Image (cartoon, helix red, strand yellow):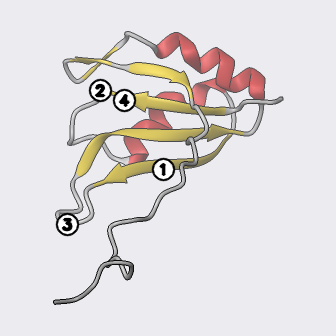
Amino acid sequence: MQQNKLYVGNFPYSVNENDLRDLFASYGPIEDVRLITDRETGRSKGFAFITFATQSAAESALEQNGKDMKGRALRVNVAQDKVKTGGGGGGPRNDRPRW
């Protein structure tokens, strides 16, 4: 299985998508940068996912793990697929009598 998507975390909230592109572009072509933001405030949560065009570029970019970015040590790992759970729930239960 080819894995060309990386998790990049522990960077300052002031970092934007362009900062990440600039930092990782030297490793190879980047297909997508997905900066994760808070839904309510729109502020960065300090992590992102970067998808490279090739697996070899992504593997090379792993060397950024632990490197300093604006005073913080980056965490760079191969992204893991989100585990799908049964989800849902929390709705009204219709099997209880209404008194």
On residue 40, the disc is 3
For badge 2, the amino acid type reads: Asn
Q: Say whether marks 1 and 3 touch (CB < 8 Å).
A: no
Locate residue 36, reporting x and y percent.
Answer: 37, 50
Measure how far apart labels 2 and 4 are at the Cα level: 4 Å
Which quadrant of the figure contains the N terminus? top right
Q: Residues within 10 Å of mark 1 (few under 14, many from 20)?
A: some
N-terminal of the pair, mark 2 or mark 3, is: 2
**Quarter residue 39 falls in:** bottom left
Mark 3: few, some, or many residues within 10 Å (few <14, many ≥20)?
A: few
Q: Residue at x 22, y 24 (%)?
A: 70
Chain-order first, disc 1 or disc 3:
1
> In this rendering, is residue 89 above or below 17?
below
- Give the amino acid at mark 1: Arg
- Disc 2 crowd rating (10 Å Cα; few below 14, some 14-19, many 20+) is some
Q: CA distance from mark 2 to mark 1?
A: 15 Å
- Residue of label 2: 10
Label placed on residue 9: 4
Name the residue rendered at 44%, 64% in the picture. Answer: 88
Residue 45 as seen in the image, left or right of residue 49? left
Q: Are marks 2 and 1 in contact (CB under 8 Å)?
A: no
> What number is the disc on residue 34?
1
Which residue shows up at 21% across the image and 55% down it?
Answer: 43
